[in-house]
Amino acid sequence: MAAVTSLSFSALSQSFERKLSVPSTRTFESIRVRSDLSSDPSAAVSASNSSFGFVIQCMSSTSAITETPPVSATKLNFLKAYKRPIPSIYNNLLQELFIQRHLMRCERTYRYHPVFALGFVTVYDQLMEGYPSDEDQSAIFEAYLRALNVDPEQYRKDAQKLEEWARTQTSASLVDFSSRKGEIEDILKDIAARAGGNRNFSYSRFFAVGLFRLLELANASEPTILEKVLSWKCAHTNISEFHLWRVLLRKLNHACDAIVGIPNFCCSCQLDLLTRWKSDKRLFQNGLSTIRSHEYSAGSLSEENRLFLEAWRTLDRAYVDKTFNGQSWFRYRENALRNEPMNSREETYAAIRKMISTLNDPFTRFLEPEKLKNLRSGTQSSLTGVGISIGPITIDRSSTGVVVISAAPGGPASRAGILPGDIILAIDGASTEGMGIYEAANILQGADGSSVELTIRSKDEIKHVGLKRERVTLNPVKSRLCEMPGSAKDTPQNVGYIKLMSFTQNASDAVKEAIETLRSNNVNAFVLDLRDNSGGLFPEGIETAKIWLNKGVIVYICDSRGVRDIYDVEGSNAIAASEPLAVLVNKGTASASEILAGALKDNKRAVVFGEPTYGKGKIQSVFELSDGSGLAVTVARYETPAHTDIDKVGIKPDHPLPASFPKDENDFCTCVQDPSSACYLNGAQLFSR
């Protein structure tokens, strides 16, 4: 121990100085350091000539203090370098690391040190343990450090070099390292000089973690060894807060504990450093929560617990709102595993439903195995029910109930006179007040030929409607050729009318077939009717847009950070990109049909007629869980090519339609052929802006 405290640090500083140029857009002075490992190029620095003189400042070549860039600028650099979405918990932790690392860059006494690099790499690797993609994990690390204007390869290289050295050490060699000569030993001597001498020693949580990592790798983390190694200038040191660093969870826990040991380097500043450590403790507590998410082993969890965690992780990865409706998502999981009964499958399902309810999102829901099967059948060619699409009365759930979005032409509801906008007050006598739309949809479906009674409010009238369920064929497309004799030369002679009722599987192929059939009859313009089309499969909406567009953006997919993905057109599928096109919409036009209408409108491909659409600007994906149940999760929101967020607002048409304009393909022709009709629109009106 005496050998450590009697080192000639003045001689050491003379022996191991070297210069390092700082790569930056600015011209910086060089740094003189006592180490053979590289120094951090993240900040310009100057050094004094004293034995412990490493006062670090952000200096230009004219010795003027430069302005530290704001954290927001550093974050922006990161987002430019790494554009893929990051799961919320990892993103939150990275943001905290980002801020803390950024603020250190030009701290007066901050100096890069290989031990600092080891600590940073250790924290990053353990916080990112279990990240879905190793490739992404490396890419994030590189983008993260380059945004801070430092070299990620140098960080990895320095950390690896220290780790390799530590693995060759023993407790005894660490205790007497001051008598040995070598690159790493000189680094530790430098630390001893500055820390023990209480001269310009910069506090850093990453430095503390790096030092503890060295001790752990050398099997020197026992308190007795720590006391000998760390107490260079303190005759009496209390290190009772150090514990063994075991398994994944405890590794980060003890990295946190290591910070408590920093005052042992500098007894006179113990109180100040302890105060600073307490203020920084939140970073590591959040880190512990991350590690705990990977802590559970097969032996400590029941099968029901594992199913619940599978649902929780699915939401964690996929859900669009990374604040999870303003709650701590990790804390919810911890509390649920402790407090929610999960002794049977039904109890687990109830726990999952309860978890989802905290998101307050009417479109994110849990699906038992049978409901998942029914949902998938709803995107096939037929289903058994009453032939209506429903939604919440208001998307933000400010009031409850169920509204009819659309009624399938020829279906039971349509034949009974049920219209889009009608409110379903009760189903078989059960009030829809407080009933979710998917619960209501499940009740409306049933055996072919069975009966159901709806209580409907249509405008100001309350009526009871008895319906028989039947298999409703979801032929997504109907078409009609409308000849327009006597048209002016500059307006279309033959108009092809296409009614697209839903985006079921192969809907885009059905549209292509309709176009080709109409073209064989020499049509030179099209009307695409999306009224009462409540959506369906998102990919089919994209593929249908490609039919009409030879270039441009179809839709922007956005999450809480902004644009996440872009769907655009390269033109290979555009079989109808030149003919005049009119699009018809109403308040029953929702979801994927709004994507299509928005793309055609914003790209100036079509003139849009009708009324504002429903305004469902959220996208759901279905995830199957291991037991056959599933989650329908809101994974993103979308913006039109003009960056319009239509959620709760809808697509606004270019022109209204006459109130009497029919929805039937047969009557449509009358409205474009007969000038005496109340719904008459001539070709010039229909295809001009």
Image (cartoon, rainbow, N blue to C red):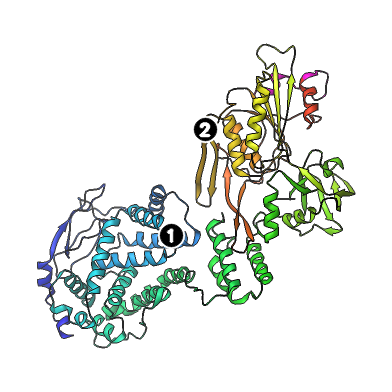
What amino acid is at disc 2? Gly
Segment colored magenta:
673-689
- Does the residue at mark 1 contact the one at mark 2 (Cβ under 8 Å)? no
Q: Is residue 561 left or right of residue 384?
A: left
Give the main secondary structure of the magenta stretch: loop
In the depicted view, which residue is nearer to us: 472 or 180? Answer: 472
**Image coords of residue 540 (percent x, y):** 61, 40
Q: Is residue 130 above or below residue 508?
A: below
Q: Secondary structure at mark 2?
A: strand
Q: Tell me if residue 233 is in the magenta stretch.
A: no
Q: Is residue 485 above or below residue 340?
A: above
Q: Residue at x 77, y 52 (%)?
A: 402
What amino acid is at disc 1? Gln
Few, some or many residues within 10 Å of mark 1 (<14, 14–19, 20+)? some
Which image quadrant: the N terminus? bottom left
Q: Which residue is mark 1?
A: 95
Q: Tell me if residue 679 is in the magenta stretch.
A: yes
Q: Is residue 623 left or right of residue 234?
A: right
Count numbered badges in the picture. Answer: 2
Q: Which residue is mark 2?
A: 552
Q: Is residue 533 above or below residue 105?
A: above
Few, some or many residues within 10 Å of mark 2 (<14, 14–19, 20+)? some
Sequence-first disc among 1 and 2: 1
Q: Nearer the viewer, mark 1 or mark 2?
A: 2
**Residue 185 shows in this picture:** yes
**Image coords of residue 215 (percent x, y):** 28, 77
**Image coords of residue 349 (percent x, y):** 66, 67
